[in-house]
Amino acid sequence: MNDVKDFGPYTVKNVKNFMGRDTYGFNCTLYRDGKKVAFCIDDGNGGEVDIQWTGPRPKSHEDKKGWEKWRNFRDEQEKLLASHVKSLPKVKSEYCEDGLTIDQGWFITELVNKFEKEKDVRKMRRQCQTKTLYRTPDQGKTQYYIHSAPFAKQFGDALRQKYGKDVEIFNEVFEQGNIPSVL
């Protein structure tokens, strides 16, 4: 995760996750400069991400001008995405000296990961408004406590006294402009 650093004009919305045969899958809507350009599906069965280009669909099968307009839209969007992905630097890998080349499926998967992380950050920030969230040094990387009381400096001091200076209090982490380590 976080292999892509430059998402350019691309974002995703309407992300839905589900369990496929091999791994988790997703579907989402791909946007370029705020305009919907494709519907993307990773079916979780080990294959490629399927990109279904949207655009001005013709009203009937006989509408040749409408189909031509749609094909032009699709071709342009495919070229723009391919160009952006091709411009991305290779990802360092212990398995490949030259690095790994990011493809369109990897790029879209990273967009979905970014979307999910931002959603988790928003949820955690909302929780910090009315609760105290913290992780003790003995907990796993993704585990943390949610205390029903709103955060107060005295409570933070009591947590540090009980668990030591390595306790991570998410309320304070957000106040400092950072993101908790569990994300």
Image (spheres, rainbow, N blue to C red):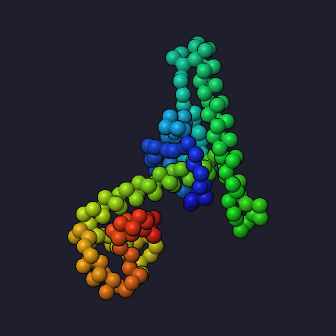
Nearest the camera: 103 or 177?
Answer: 177
Q: Is residue 180 above or below residue 2?
A: below
Q: Is residue 148 visible?
A: no
Q: Residue at x 55, y 43 (%)?
A: 10
Q: Position of residue 80 (x, y in %)?
A: 64, 37
Q: Residue at x 73, y 66 (%)?
A: 95
Q: Is residue 61 above or below residue 29?
A: above
Q: Position of residue 119 (x, y in %)?
A: 41, 54
Q: Give residue 142's quadrant in the image.
A: bottom left
Q: Is residue 52 visible?
A: yes
Image quadrant containing the N terminus: bottom right
Nearest the camera: 153 or 27?
Answer: 153
Q: Is residue 156 left or right of residue 98?
A: left
Q: Residue furthest right?
A: 97
Image quadrant containing the C terminus: bottom left
Q: Is residue 28 above or below residue 115?
A: above
Q: Residue at x 51, y 55 (%)?
A: 113
Q: Residue at x 59, y 41 (%)?
A: 50
Q: Is residue 168 left or right of residue 101?
A: left
Q: Is residue 153 above or below residue 13?
A: below
